[in-house]
Image (cartoon, grey):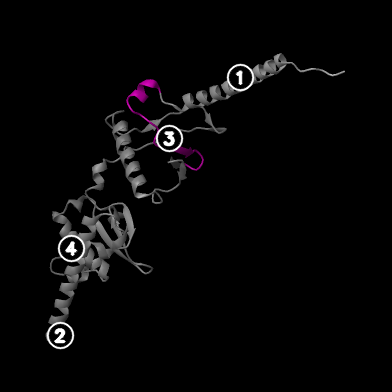
């Protein structure tokens, strides 16, 4: 006995399939919208332009933090790109202002109750962040590289200039750069040269490190360093001539 499939049954099957597809699609869309709503900031913050820029992951046992930035996790500040370092320092400055509004003095303790990851949370000690302008008074490379070769001329005795003179060419050029920076807009960041046996010289501009002069993306800094190197060559040539005549 043959069963004839009428157009009515075909239409009915198509309608049922369409309804099932719409139901499944609505379930997935509702889940996605719910997930997006959970990550979105409150409406008033969104209207003011607030958006997530970074996350901090804290280990209560190790007392360390890991920074999540641009979808990646970073354990150390030095591995960040120059642009990421600028953003982090800007956030640090804003956070410092935010914490300073809590009280006039440093925040000594923040009591936290409950557990995290199955461990009891203990009070965390916080100290007041130093003002961001503190970085401008001293080049960061002076802190990272406390080398006697890079001491300022004013720190040595005026009657004994030779012992304070750097032994490396990079150190001697750094002294010339230091004098040029007194009248340069770059003086707030500071520039230091450090000899590197692998590629000649490392250049520190503020908190940024570059492998050689050609790698510096700032034309004004490149020009200043090359001018200091040219002045060093002239002074060295003059010194050789004077010693030869003597």
For this orientation, the residue located farthest to the bottom is 245
Q: Secondary structure at mark 2?
A: helix
CA separation in Å, label 2 and label 3: 66 Å
Q: Which disc number belongs to residue 153? A: 4
Measured as percent of width and height from the top left, residue 35 is found at: 51, 26
Mark 3 lies on residue: 124
Mark 2 lies on residue: 244
Mark 1 lies on residue: 23
Q: Quadrant of the C terminus?
A: bottom left
From the viewer's perspective, tell me whether residue 120 is left or right of residue 159.
Answer: right
Q: Nearer the viewer, residue 191 or 44?
A: 44
CA separation in Å, label 4 and label 3: 43 Å
Question: Which dot, 1 or 2, sits closer to the camera?
Answer: 1
Query: Of label 1 and label 4, which has the lower sequence position?
Result: 1
Measured as percent of width and height from the top left, residue 25 is found at: 58, 23
Question: Which dot, 1 or 4, sits closer to the camera?
Answer: 1
Q: Place residue 11 in its image quadrant.
A: top right
Question: Which dot, 2 or 4, sits closer to the camera?
Answer: 2
């Amino acid at each position: 006995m043959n069963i004839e499939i009428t157009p009515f049954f075909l239409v009915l099957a198509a309608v049922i399939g369409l309804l099932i597809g719409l139901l499944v699609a609505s379930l997935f869309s509702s889940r996605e919208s719910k997930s997006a709503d959970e990550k979105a900031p409150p409406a008033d913050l969104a209207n003011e332009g607030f958006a997530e820029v970074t996350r901090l992951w804290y280990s209560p046992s190790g007392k360390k933090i890991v920074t999540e930035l641009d979808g990646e996790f970073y354990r150390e500040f030095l591995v960040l790109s120059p642009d990421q370092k600028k953003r982090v320092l800007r956030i640090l400055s804003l956070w410092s202002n935010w914490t300073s509004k809590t009280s006039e003095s440093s925040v000594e303790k923040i009591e936290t109750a409950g557990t995290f990851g199955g461990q009891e949370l203990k009070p965390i000690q916080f100290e007041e962040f130093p003002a961001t302008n503190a970085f401008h008074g001293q080049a960061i490379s002076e802190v990272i590289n406390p080398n006697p070769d890079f001491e300022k001329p004013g720190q040595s005795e005026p009657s004994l200039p030779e012992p304070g003179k750097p032994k490396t060419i990079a150190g001697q050029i750094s002294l010339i750069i230091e004098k040029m920076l007194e009248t340069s807009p770059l003086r707030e960041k500071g520039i230091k040269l450090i000899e590197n046996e692998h590629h000649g010289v490392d250049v520190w501009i503020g908190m940024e490190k570059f492998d050689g002069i050609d790698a510096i993306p700032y034309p004004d800094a490149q020009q200043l360093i090359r001018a200091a190197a040219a002045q060093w060559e002239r002074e060295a040539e003059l010194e050789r001539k004077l010693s030869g005549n003597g």
